[in-house]
């Protein structure tokens, strides 16, 4: 019954659609390191499986560390009282000792019970429990998004809300809020409360005013300035960023590496196809087509040999930023040295 090849967003969306229409699987395995979609599906089940009056006698929520497998099985095998079904939710199921023994129940679950296992991490797919739930129930595997995937996710999320978000604004949000999907949802909710009623287009300025971030001094802006070799602006931005109390050299080098790796990939793709469509190139690079002009300029300003040197430099400074052979240099000094050397290539 269960399929895990689809994206977490699509799988969760399909599950929630079925749940809200009254279709319930006997067992749900909601697993992974990213809780956003797991929480969405679990919330939908808890809202729709039972009415408020039915929950007193037919809903049980327990935690893996405080529960025995035998108790979960016993509770799951009970019949509902004055209701069509009962709901058993096991949170932090990864802490449930002997969890594989749950296969005794999931091999033949009751249709009148909805058993939900919330598992932080990944249940072993080679073993009986996972295989059993895959046949009899539903599986959602929610893995964290990578940094380079965030702009696309944010754009899709805003589109699902009926909002048009400028690509620059999506990139800025992704940089400042990271890959925490719940935080993006919360900040978006705050943003919309402060926007004029009926607003459908969200700009960088709206993000700066309502989320409390600034494009002018951000890694997003620094990589753009490096792409265009805007020396003075890049040095000023690097100085500002590296002087911040929360500045971390490894995070900075990670962002720079991702940027120059895309430029390197751009060169490789151009070698295969000298005249690709901008939309195809953007898709292969994993960026919004809006940013292709920047990558065209970056590839021109950093030909293949310089691009490879840039990546080597970034790796060296990443090592230094983590305490390797940096001498007495501070993180701020290392950042300024790296920025200067990138501009001089």
Image (cartoon, rainbow, N blue to C red):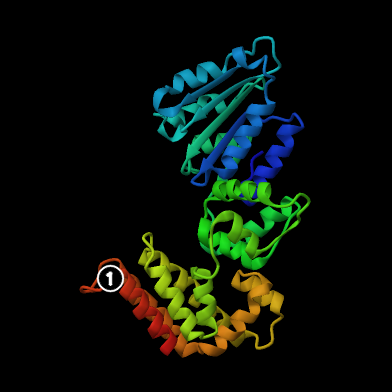
| Image vertical order of residue 93 relative to residue 330, above or below | above
| Residue at left offset 49%, top offset 75% | 222
Q: Secondary structure at mark 1?
A: loop
Q: Residue at image x 42%, y 68%?
A: 241
- Please give left or right for residue 35 compared with residue 64 in the image: right
Tell me if mark 1 has few (under 14), some (14-19) or many (20+) residues whose alpha carbon lies within 10 angstroms of its own.
Answer: some
User: x, y (%) of residue 59?
Assistant: 59, 19
Front-lying residue, 309 or 276: 309
Residue at (76%, 52%) from the top-left corner?
162
Quadrant holding the N terminus: top right
Quarter of the rendering containing residue 270: bottom right
Q: Which residue is mark 1?
A: 330
Q: Is residue 190 above or below residue 316?
A: above
- Residue 57 placement: quadrant: top right
Task: Using the rendered view, name the quadrant where residue 173 is placed.
Answer: bottom right
Q: Quadrant of the C terminus?
A: bottom left
The answer to whether residue 10 is visible is: no
In the rendered image, residue 341, in percent from the top left (x then y), is placed at 38, 85
Q: Position of residue 84 (x, y in %)?
A: 71, 17
Please state which of residues 273 and 312 is positioned toward the viewer in this rendering: 312
Taking the spot 68% from the left edge, 65% from the top edge, the residue there is 166
The residue closer to the viewer here, 113 or 257, is 257
Q: Is residue 114 visible?
A: yes
The relative height of residue 130 versus residue 283 in the rendered view (above or below) is: above
Where is residue 88 shown, x and y percent of the image? 56, 23
């Amino acid at each position: 019954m269960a399929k895990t090849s689809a994206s977490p967003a699509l799988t969760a969306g399909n599950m929630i659609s079925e749940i809200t229409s009254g279709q319930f699987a006997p067992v749900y395995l909601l697993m992974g390191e990213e809780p956003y979609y797991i929480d969405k599906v679990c919330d939908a089940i808890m809202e729709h499986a039972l009415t408020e009056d039915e929950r007193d006698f037919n809903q049980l929520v327990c935690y893996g560390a405080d529960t025995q497998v035998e108790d979960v099985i016993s509770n799951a095998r009970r019949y509902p009282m004055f209701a069509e079904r009962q709901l058993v939710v096991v949170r932090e199921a990864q802490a449930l000792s002997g969890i594989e023994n749950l296969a005794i129940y999931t091999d033949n679950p009751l249709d009148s019970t909805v058993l939900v296992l919330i598992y932080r991490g990944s249940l072993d797919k080679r073993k009986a429990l996972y295989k059993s739930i895959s046949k009899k129930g539903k599986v959602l595997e929610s893995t964290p998004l990578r940094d380079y995937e965030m702009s696309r996710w944010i754009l899709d999320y805003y589109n699902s809300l009926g909002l048009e978000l400028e690509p620059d604004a999506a990139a800025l949000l992704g940089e400042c809020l990271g890959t925490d999907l719940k935080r993006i949802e919360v900040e978006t909710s705050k943003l919309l409360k402060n926007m004029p009623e009926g607003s459908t287009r969200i700009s960088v300025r709206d993000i700066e005013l309502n989320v409390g971030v600034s494009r002018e001094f951000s890694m997003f802006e620094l990589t753009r300035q490096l792409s265009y070799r805007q020396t003075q602006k890049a040095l000023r931005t690097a100085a500002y960023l590296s002087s911040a109390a929360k500045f971390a050299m490894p995070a900075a080098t990670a962002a720079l590496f991702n940027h120059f790796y895309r430029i390197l990939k751009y060169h490789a793709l151009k070698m295969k196809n000298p005249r690709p469509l901008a939309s195809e190139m953007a898709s292969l690079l994993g960026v919004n087509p809006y940013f292709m002009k920047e990558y065209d300029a970056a590839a021109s300003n950093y030909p293949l040999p310089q691009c490879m040197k840039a990546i080597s430099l970034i790796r060296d400074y990443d090592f230094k930023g983590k305490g390797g052979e940096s001498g007495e240099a501070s993180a701020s000094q290392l950042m300024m040295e790296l920025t200067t050397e990138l501009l001089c290539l």
